[in-house]
Image (cartoon, rainbow, N blue to C red):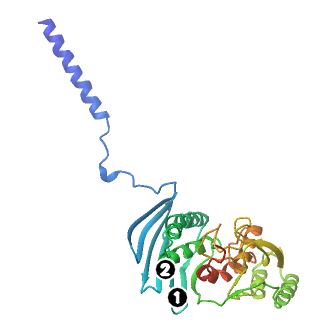
């Protein structure tokens, strides 16, 4: 009888310990409470819907997600919408009427947005542009405009509010850029204003904005692998002209509209001016901060309309 009582007691203890362990072990979380999927750290390009005349998809780089929707209408016009980290940018272009427009609804881009857009343009070049060139087929207009808008936004000055820009097809010219006659007046204006205002003051910023000129001269192609007269202004100096080597054989394709050597845009003086200013001063945070914002706005027609003359 003694042994039977001991076995029963032991069995009871085992049950008690097992029950205690069961209480201490947390139940698995319901599937609905699982952590949401996060964007991948690598460049994740996905097309979710496509046809000959439209593409819809996403691109993720780290925490920044770009959603894109592009459509060709009637073979001569296209519309593109890019959502960059929740900020919406649009572009439209009609090659028959020569009209183009792009807008950001006064949104602004931050460094992470620009890095994602730069990676996005590289993905578009690899997936769409190079594939079309290899097959010797035309690039659909909506894909061409998607790439151009992405390149343009990737170069936007950080923090600048992007409103609506109307960009009709500009006059395209070939030749050498010369120092504009009006730049002498601009330099004089800046020098006089510098004596009358305090550095880094609102009055100084307003003076610089009033003195600067857009110098919007349409699209002037530089030529391929040549020395070009490139000009820009900045807070530390007035208009500065330099002879810079531009073209596919130059350092990082100087003068190409868009970062690097993207193959659908041309080598132009406006883009060379912006390239040189950005490399010297690191871009800008305001279009009228006397760094590179004015060069950026001057080049938007080159981004949207120029063609590659240096195959």
Residue reaching furthest bottom?
A: 97
In the rendered structure, the answer to whether residue 102 lies left or right of residue 288 reads: left
* Between discs 2 and 1, the one toward the N terminus: 1
Residue under pointer 1:
95
Residues tagged 2 and 1 counted as in contact (Cβ below 8 A): yes
* Residue 50 pos. (x, y %): 39, 71
| Cα distance in 3D space between marks 2 and 1 | 9 Å
Q: Residue at label 2?
A: 141
- Residue furthest to the left: 1
Q: Secondary structure at mark 2?
A: helix
Expressed as whole percent of the image width and height from the top left, the position of residue 230 reads 78, 77
Q: Nearer the viewer, residue 278 or 178?
A: 178
Q: Residue furthest front?
A: 136
- Could you tell me which residue is drawn at 54 percent across and 82 percent down? 102
Disc 1 element: loop
Estimate the x, y position of residue 189 in percent, counting from the top left: 84, 88
- The quadrant of the image that shows the C terminus is bottom right
Return the x and y of residue 138 as percentages of the image width and height: 50, 76
- What mark, if any, has residue 260 been given in the picture? none
Q: Quadrant of the N terminus?
A: top left
């Amino acid at each position: 009888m003694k042994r039977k009582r001991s076995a029963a007691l032991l069995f009871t203890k085992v049950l008690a310990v097992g029950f205690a362990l069961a209480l201490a072990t947390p139940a698995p979380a319901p599937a609905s409470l699982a952590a949401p999927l996060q964007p991948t750290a690598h460049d994740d390009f996905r097309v979710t819907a496509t046809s000959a005349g439209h593409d819809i998809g996403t691109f993720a780089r780290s925490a920044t997600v770009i959603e894109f929707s592009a459509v060709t209408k009637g073979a001569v016009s296209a519309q593109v919408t890019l959502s960059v980290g929740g900020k919406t940018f649009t572009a439209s272009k009609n090659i028959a009427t020569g009209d183009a427009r792009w807008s950001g609804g006064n949104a602004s881009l931050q460094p992470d947005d620009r890095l994602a857009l730069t990676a996005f343009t590289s993905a578009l070049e690899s997936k769409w542009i190079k594939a079309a060139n290899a097959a010797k087929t035309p690039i659909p207009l909506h894909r061409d405009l998607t790439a151009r808008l992405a390149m343009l936004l990737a170069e936007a000055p950080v923090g600048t509010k992007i409103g609506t820009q109307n960009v009709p097809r500009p006059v395209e010219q070939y030749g050498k850029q010369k120092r504009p006659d009006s730049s002498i007046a601009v330099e004089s204006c800046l020098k006089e204003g510098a004596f009358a205002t305090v550095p880094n003051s609102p009055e100084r910023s307003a003076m610089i904005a009033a003195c600067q000129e857009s110098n919007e001269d349409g699209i002037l192609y530089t030529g391929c692998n040549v020395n070009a007269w490139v000009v820009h202004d900045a807070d530390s100096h007035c208009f500065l002209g330099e002879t810079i080597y531009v073209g596919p054989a130059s350092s990082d394709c100087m003068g190409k509209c868009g970062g690097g050597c993207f193959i659908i845009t041309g080598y132009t003086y406006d883009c060379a001016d912006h390239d040189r200013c950005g490399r010297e001063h690191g871009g800008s945070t305001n279009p009228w901060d006397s760094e590179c914002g004015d060069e950026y706005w001057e080049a938007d027609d080159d981004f949207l309309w120029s063609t590659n003359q240096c195959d």
